Image: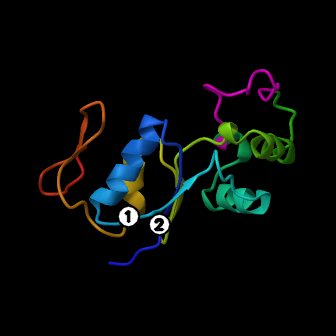
């Protein structure tokens, strides 16, 4: 099945790696955008945030970023200011963000990607930490 899936991916992130692996476990080879190397244009980032039903603040990543140094916890900052910060420092964009024909979602936890895949998992899947997410018949575990 030819399905257009895009993942905004950071290969250093376990959640992002698990999400990518689940997409591939459904027999889909996605377009992988390493957003730290090739950040989305501002208009695209704003569109992705909107399509995901999020606010820019909800997409901000705090851990391992200059979030605190930049004062981004200040609740008086506008959405435009937060998007400007993400454009200047792409590490502030939380990941993985996945785009599919079924929607756009920040896939944290990684198994949230299963809601965006139009095809079933082809077999069992366990996260890198050993947590079983999908059983041998391709069914999501509760």
Residue 66 is inside the magenta segment = yes
Residue at the disc numbered 2: 5
| Residue closest to the far left | 136
Q: Position of residue 33 (x, y in %)?
A: 56, 56
Q: Quadrant of the N terminus?
A: bottom left
In the image: residue 32, left or right of residue 80: left
Q: Residues within 10 Å of mark 2 (few under 14, many from 20)?
A: many
Q: Where is residue 130 in the image (x, y as percent from the top left)?
A: 24, 32
The image quarter in which residue 76 lies: top right
Residue at the disc numbered 1: 117
Q: Is residue 108 shown above or below 113?
A: above
Q: Is residue 105 shown above or below 90?
A: below
| Total marks placed | 2
Of 26 and 74, nearer the camera is 26
| Residue closest to the far front | 37
In the image: residue 55, left or right of residue 34: right
| Residue closest to the far bottom | 2
Q: Where is residue 102 in the image (x, y as percent from the top left)?
A: 47, 68
Magenta stretch secondary structure, dominant:
loop
Q: Identify the residue shown where x is 38% and y is 65%.
A: 29
Of 118 and 8, nearer the camera is 8
Tell me the magenta residue range.
Answer: 59-73
- Tag 2–tag 1 contact (CB < 8 Å): yes
Q: Position of residue 32 (x, y in %)?
A: 50, 58
Of 11 and 26, nearer the camera is 11
Q: What element carries label 2?
A: loop
The answer to which of marks 2 and 1 sits earlier in the sequence is 2
Q: Identify the residue shown where x is 38% and y is 64%.
A: 117
Q: Mark 2 to mark 1: distance in Å?
A: 8 Å
Q: Quadrant of the C terminus?
A: top left
Tell us which disc is closer to us: 2 or 1.
Answer: 2
The image quarter in which residue 104 lies: bottom right
């Amino acid at each position: 099945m030819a399905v257009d899936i895009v993942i905004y991916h950071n290969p250093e992130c376990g959640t992002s790696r698990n999400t990518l692996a689940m997409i591939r476990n459904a027999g889909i080879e996605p377009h992988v955008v390493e957003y730290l190397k090739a950040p989305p244009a501002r208009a695209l980032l704003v569109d992705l945030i909107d399509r995901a039903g999020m606010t820019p603040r909800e997409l901000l990543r705090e851990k391992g970023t200059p979030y605190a140094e930049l004062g981004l916890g200040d609740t008086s900052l506008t959405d435009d200011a937060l998007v400007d910060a993400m454009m200047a420092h792409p590490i502030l964009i939380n990941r993985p963000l996945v785009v599919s024909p079924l929607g756009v979602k920040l896939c944290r936890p990684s198994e949230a990607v299963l809601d965006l895949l139009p095809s079933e998992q082809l077999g069992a899947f366990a996260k890198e930490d050993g947590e079983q997410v999908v059983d041998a018949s391709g069914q999501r575990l509760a």
